[in-house]
Image: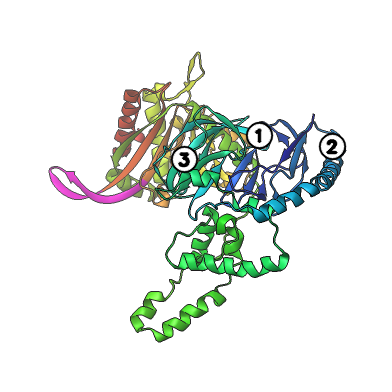
Amino acid sequence: MAEVINMPRLSDTMEEGTVAKWLKQVGDKIEEGDILAEIETDKATMEFESFHEGTLLHIGIEEGDGAPVDSLLAIIGEKGEDISGLLNGSATTEDTDSGSEAADSAPEQAATADAGATETTSEIPEGVEVVKMPRLSDTMEEGTVAAWLKSVGDTIEEGDILAEIETDKATMEFESFYSGTLLYIGIKEGESSPVDAVLAVIGPEGTDVDAVLNAKPAAEKAEAAPVAKDEVAQEQPAAAETTVNNTANGQRIFASPLAKRIASDKGIDLSQVTGTGDHGRIVKKDVENYKPSAQTAPVAETATTAPATAAAALAPINLPVGEEGSEEVKNSQMRKTIAKRLAESKFTAPHYYLMIEVDMDNAMASRVQINSLPETKVSFNDMVVKAAAMALKKHPQVNTTWNGDTTRYNHHIHVGVAVAVEDGLMVPVLKFTDQMSLTQIGASVKDLAGKARNKKLAPAEMEGSTFTVSNLGMFGIVEFTSIINQPNSAILSVGAIVQKPVVKNGEIVVGNTMTVSLACDHRTVDGATGASFLQTLRAYLENPVTMLA
């Protein structure tokens, strides 16, 4: 059966919400806990999750549109289900109910208005906030305070977590949107109360809480004694003026976190912005609609008559102003496959890392001699690949694969060489690397890397690796670690060759060193085994002649 999801009340003062972004579309499969949309309240932009499973059949509020709390937000049900009755019925029911309620309540409203004209009640003092039980889900009717994280008398800052509230679907943290002293707790731990019941009172220390609880809210007084439209029009400018003056006199500025962030990004002084939210709170639209020219003119005029030092003090800081932007780029199949396999490797194989420094002086000299031969070109990476293959012959435990109940020892050595391409990373494989010469390795790597960048690699050329080498030295990276390329048990990360002072024969001289790190799967390769492999690898690189035998 289809479920109607209404705009939730995500804060205690929220009257309407704006759908900042839909993360699901009509026709999408919805699981319980999926994030449906990002909803912007008067205080923050929050993720709204689904508490139902099914197919998203209808979206009632488009991106960027706002609607009151309890408005139709979406409908979730079975694919192909007829929801016309829900769409038509809701509108008809609302119209009928509102009309009948208006007719039935007319005499009562008149009586209330008369009573309001004669009744005098106290108002909630300025700076005191009555926090009510929020509606934290679309179906929430009452909430239970699972735990209070603050006590009466504690100092509260905006953003502090007041309590953990249990709804009909989840237990959620409830944060304060006000600063002050926690004067009163209306619902004890373990107790339940309907939405909008008094949860707490926050205000200046020493406030008469009984007077606050017995005071009639301003909204109720407005309903009891309606004011003529022309009177409202006359009162509004005065209220706006009071808000600006209060903030200008150094009192606390009430603004939503989102409004503060936008104001900070745009370099807007919030004391010059008139708030249209609850109790004069500055919300997002107030900052976005702010026109600085009219507000700053008096300041500029005053500055001209003040001394130069005062003018400098009043001058606003010129902060950069720009427009935030982003774009959604669809992930390629290659990128999604890489992400999936690396995540599986990282979260299933218990990685640990070993590092060692290699003296590359002899390797550099040997490379010069090798490359002096006609039609011969060998890179340092080729030398590392050859040394790794030979070291694997002496340490077969590193050349293994974990299979759960068994460990596969590979008697052949196929070294994969990581190659960066436009869409991610590819690993062409050199088959029987230990039997290849340095020049054969160099030619094969060049050929396979070219195919990888041109997307011409055959599947067979990327399969079967037993060990992997990743080199970022050509990018100036001195040292790094890699994620194991499963089903391998280890991957070697090769850094850049750097010149630095080293000690040789008791003297400090300039040396050329290279740092390599080995990431190992602890299920198959123990620490001592990995360390022995790196010692053998270093011996080959520091004595290249041994690789030519």
Magenta segment, which residues? 496-511
Q: Give the CA distance from mark 3 to mark 1.
A: 23 Å
Mark earlier in primary sequence (3, 1) = 1
User: Residue beneath label 2, please?
Assistant: 83
Mark earlier in primary sequence (2, 3) = 2
Task: In this rendered view, identify the residue nearer to me: 136 or 59.
Answer: 136
Q: Residue at horizontal 36%, vertical 79%? A: 310
Camera-side mark, 2 or 3: 3
Residue 337 visible here? yes
Instruction: Count residues near mark 3 (Cα–Cα under 10 Å), then give few for <14, some for 14-19, many for 20+.
Output: many
Task: In this rendered view, identify the residue nearer to me: 529 or 301.
Answer: 301
Report the quarter where the N terminus lies: top right
Instruction: Count residues near mark 2 (Cα–Cα under 10 Å), then give few for <14, some for 14-19, many for 20+.
Output: some
Residue 447 visible here? no
Dominant secondary-structure state across the stretch colored magenta: strand
Q: Is 132 one of the magenta-colored residues?
A: no
Camera-side mark, 3 or 1: 3
Asked which quadrant contains residue 240, the reply is bottom right
Q: Give the CA distance from mark 1 to mark 2.
A: 24 Å
Q: Is mark 2 on a helix, strand or loop?
A: loop
Q: Give the CA distance from mark 2 to mark 3.
A: 46 Å
Q: What residue type is labelled 3?
A: Tyr
Q: Which labelled disc corresponds to residue 184?
A: 3
Q: Residue at horizontal 54%, vertical 38%? A: 428
x and y, in percent, of residue 146 in the image: 51, 29
Residue 424 vs residue 81: left or right?
Answer: left
x and y, in percent, of residue 534 in the image: 33, 31
In the picture as drawn, the residue positioned furthest to the front comes out as: 118
Q: What element carries label 3?
A: strand
Please tell me whether residue 406 is drawn above or below residue 181 in the rendered image. Answer: above
Q: Residue at horizontal 59%, vertical 55%? A: 278
User: Residue beneath label 1, please?
Assistant: 141
